[in-house]
Image (cartoon, rainbow, N blue to C red):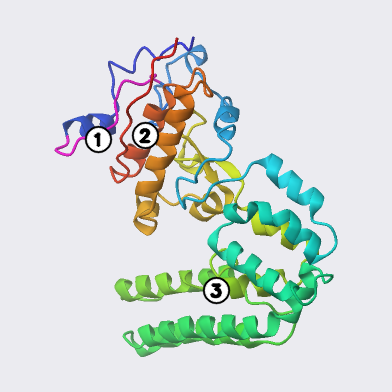
Amino acid sequence: MIQPLKLFSLNPTKQIQQAKNAQVQPRVSFVTKPDTFERSVPQAKTLAPAYVPFLGYAHDEEIRALGHIICPCCGIEMMTQKDMNKVSKNLGYSSSQAIETLDEFEKNMRPVEKECYNLLKTWAKDKPESNFKDLLNENKAPQLAKLQAKQNTILDTVDELSKQLSEKEQEEVNKVTSLTRKLVSSNDKEIKFKRKTFISDVETLENKISNKDVYTQIRKEAEKMPTSQNDVSAFVVKYADRSHQEIGERLVKLSVGTIEHIKPRSEGGRNVPGNYMLECGGCNHERSSIPLGDWVDAHPEMKENTQKYIDEVINRINSGKMKGFSFYPHAVARTLFEQSDGKLDLKVEGIKDEV
């Protein structure tokens, strides 16, 4: 049995006290194991190490064992590492072999990857012995044209926004967009446009632009630059130079369930079960250390998907598949409520008492 933190009930965190006193109360029960959810304030330094459970990545395997459960962010049914190993082993050397293996996991693919996969299947009908690399290369040119058009549209918008600035500030913005246009349109294979470089260049403008509202709009526009995770054309262009094996693996790699720290570790989030969710690798990577409240604003579907995730966890606890984890739904719901500033207010009920 886990030793509870004795100071917890006497010293509730400021955020929990505010949640209790707020007009809109969270639905989640606050009767959880004391040190299983992620609080926003660190523990008292006077506590002896023996009182602090779940150090390191202890108990993450119970969360990983959820396996085929929906991603609480995007809602896809996630894959397991065992599934991924099966894909890697059986992709073969031709598109027909790879498609035979991947068809089983098409339902698990994220939207962009699924669209790319269906393009590959269409292209492979006439050339079943071609590999994925050959197919992407044969169809790269039109996809590159589409990608460049999208990139230039964003650059046009940035230039248009800069017209609200002083002449000197506008020149600084135009320097960045002009350089980026050259990279985007270059036919030199050694010169490749890098989205991160463009965003980094835009960030250097922050101290050069006096109108912060305009800078914010420019920064948001820069973030719209397509990536292989959110744009089919970008996927085709990026992976046309990769191997058949890597392309096949990439179609499902980001669908594998990974441990997401609800409160990011970079922000002091701890390795406790109530700070863990199983989330697809794509969503986990995209969010990075973005505050959960901001992430929910950008992905409102999370309100429905996290509820489905919790409901399924409760079903598994009640069916005996997660013994000793009856505290988890309350703990994770509590962390989600706090870290999202109340935007994720989950209903947690129907958990059977463990015998």
Instruction: Provide the residue span drawn in magenta.
Output: 22-34
Q: Nearer the viewer, residue 298 or 76?
A: 76
The numbered mark, 2 or 1, whose residue comes first in the sequence reads: 1
Q: Which residue is drawn at 54% across and 87% down?
A: 178
Q: Where is residue 98 in the image (x, y as percent from the top left)?
A: 77, 59
Quickly name the residue at label 3: 198
Q: In this view, does 76 lie to the left or right of 10?
A: right
Say which mark, if any, is on residue 26: 1
**Residues under labels 3 and 1: Cα distance?**
41 Å
Q: In this view, does 318 lie to the left or right of 226?
A: left
**Residues under labels 3 and 2: Cα distance?**
38 Å
**Residues under labels 2 and 1: Cα distance?**
9 Å
Q: Where is residue 225 in the image (x, y as percent from the top left)?
A: 51, 73
Q: Where is residue 236 in the image (x, y as percent from the top left)?
A: 66, 73
Q: Nearer the viewer, residue 71 or 269?
A: 71
Instruction: Examine the image and state in which quarter residue 333 appears.
Output: top left
Q: Which residue is drawn at 58% across and 83% down?
A: 146
Q: Position of residue 293 (x, y in %)?
A: 35, 49
Q: In this view, does 138 lie to the left or right of 39?
A: right
Q: What residue type is labelled 2?
A: Ala
- Dot 2: element: helix
Q: What residue type is labelled 3?
A: Phe
Say which mark, if any, is on residue 333: 2
